[in-house]
Image (spheres, rainbow, N blue to C red):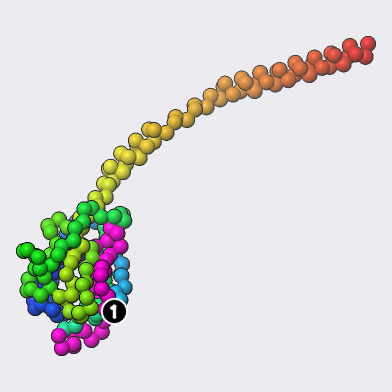
Amino acid sequence: MAHPVTQQKLFHPARLANLESASYIALPGSKMKCGLVDVKQAWTGWLVCPAGWFFNGLVRGPGTAEEPLGGGWDDVLQMRCCAPEPVVAEYGPCEVTELGKGDTKSFEDKGWVACKPGTAIAGFYRKDADPFLRSVVGLNCCELKECPKVDKVAEAEEIAAAKKPAAETVDAEKIKAEKIKAWQAKRAEAAKESEAAKDAKH
């Protein structure tokens, strides 16, 4: 599924292989767009999705499951991020969830490592290059930026159209009359010039 992940469940701490399930925000009727973010070896600091996109999964390297401790963050090659279409390149309100503080579990605990209800994971903060899950101590948790609904878009277009200056109505008869008047004036001017030329000869 391509929905934004809100939390991950650990069967056993430290091991990447023991991330056993995840929950997500359901977006019924939404078409999702997904992409991959490359993960550097021994990365530290923030690993984030592009603005408006949310964490959806990890791409692990070959042979990770055979590692004695089930592998760690350095076995991750890419992070999968998804966003509802049309993609809005910004989030709603965000906050950093510090893992292991208060009632929030850390990656050293069994159970759910989670963002607050109504938010989803947009990034991970890793304090050092310890290869196991415990090195991630923070989650960037964000709300989805609400997209305008189709009826609201149509309403906005109608308002914009109403604000445009009204086009002038084309009056075909008026244009025709003006052309005839201009032609008659031109003929009258030509006749005067002809009379003036005859008088000059005499």
Q: Which amino acid does label 1 sit on?
A: Gln
Query: Residue 26 appears at what percent x and percent y?
Result: 17, 59
Image-quadrant location for residue 49: bottom left
Residue at (93% x, 14% y) in the render: 201
How many labels sit on residues?
1
Residue at (56% x, 25% y) in the render: 172
In this picture, residue 124 sits left or right of residue 160: left
- The residue under label 1 is 41
Q: Is mark 1 on a helix, strand or loop?
A: loop
Q: Quadrant of the N terminus?
A: bottom left
Residue at (10% x, 75% y) in the render: 108
In this picture, residue 28 sits left or right of residue 156: left
Query: Residue 21 appears at what percent x and percent y?
Result: 13, 71
In this picture, residue 163 sits left or right of residue 45: right
Q: Is residue 90 above or below residue 134?
A: above
Q: Nearer the viewer, residue 99 or 165?
A: 99
Image-quadrant location for residue 7: bottom left
Can residue 190 be seen here? yes
Is residue 51 found inside the magenta-colored segment of the image?
A: yes
Mark 1, residues whose alpha carbon is within 10 Å: few (<14), some, or many (≥20)? few
Q: Is residue 180 above or below residue 117?
A: above
